[in-house]
Amino acid sequence: MFLHIGEERSFYSVRKYAQLKDLPTEEPQEETISIRPFSFFRAPIQNLKPCRTANVVDIYKYITSDYARERTERLRAMTDKKAAKRFKSTAFDYATFSGTFATRNDRDLVAHSGLICIDFDHVTDLEGLFQRLLQDEYFETQLLFRSPSGDGLKWVIPIDITEGSHKSFYESIAAYVAYTYRIDVDINCSNVSRACYLPFDPDAYIYPKLLEK
């Protein structure tokens, strides 16, 4: 499950985040590496039909290449927020990390990927949070990269969808993040078909063992 810790201390069994510090320490279980498919879409955001199926390795190669470099630099140079928002919605390809879809609509989910993407917006200490997330005690980061605007992070982590609904996981992780990192996560982004724009980020992190597959 890509967790840092053993089953008894699994995040999924934790219901009261105030008691996290009191949980016992156990040795991590052996990891099972799997490549999880999800849908990739071409711009603009109004395009609801997926272009193809992709995975974390594909997206890592996409964002670390120069493919989206020019549009990312152009977006970050914009000072008009409304113009920047319009440009982002028309220029950036995107992915639905949590699953494959017939069309980008919660009702058209074909299969859940077992992944969830958590957005961190307007982060003051971007590098500090980046490193803290990589060392998170409960989740093994699959992919971590800067947002198109440059002042946020996209954190892709695994969840065990057999343990609960996508929405319940998102809300639980939001509570965990608020408790652990003192950062609020937008609850309005909890839908399974949530789109994630794909920028240029040469310093993106990918779980190393995924590159060995």
Image (cartoon, helix red, strand yellow):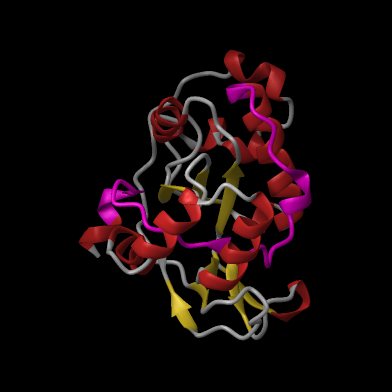
Lateral position of residue 134 relative to residue 115, left or right? left
Q: Does the magenta stretch include residue 187?
A: yes
The majority secondary structure of the magenta stretch comes to loop
Q: Which residue is drawn at 47% across and 80% down?
A: 53
Q: Which residue is drawn at 68% across and 78% down?
A: 46
Using the image, determine if residue 207 lies above or below residue 161: above
- In this view, the residue farthest toward the left is 212
Q: Which residue is drawn at 42% across and 48% down?
A: 145
Using the image, determine if residue 181 lies above or below residue 53: above
Magenta residues, start to end: 180-209
For residue 98, say whether it is visible. Answer: no
Q: Position of residue 68 (x, y in %)?
A: 38, 65
Using the image, determine if residue 99 lies above or below residue 9: below
Q: Where is residue 60 in the image (x, y as percent from the top left)?
A: 34, 60
Q: Where the C terminus falls, by quadrant? A: bottom left
Q: Residue at x 64, y 22 (%)?
A: 182
- In this view, the residue farthest toward the top is 22
Q: Position of residue 143 (x, y in %)?
A: 41, 51
Lateral position of residue 171 relative to residue 149, left or right? right
Q: How many marks?
A: 0
Q: Where is residue 183 in the image (x, y as percent from the top left)?
A: 64, 28
Q: Is residue 186 magenta?
A: yes
Lateral position of residue 71 relative to residue 182, left or right? left
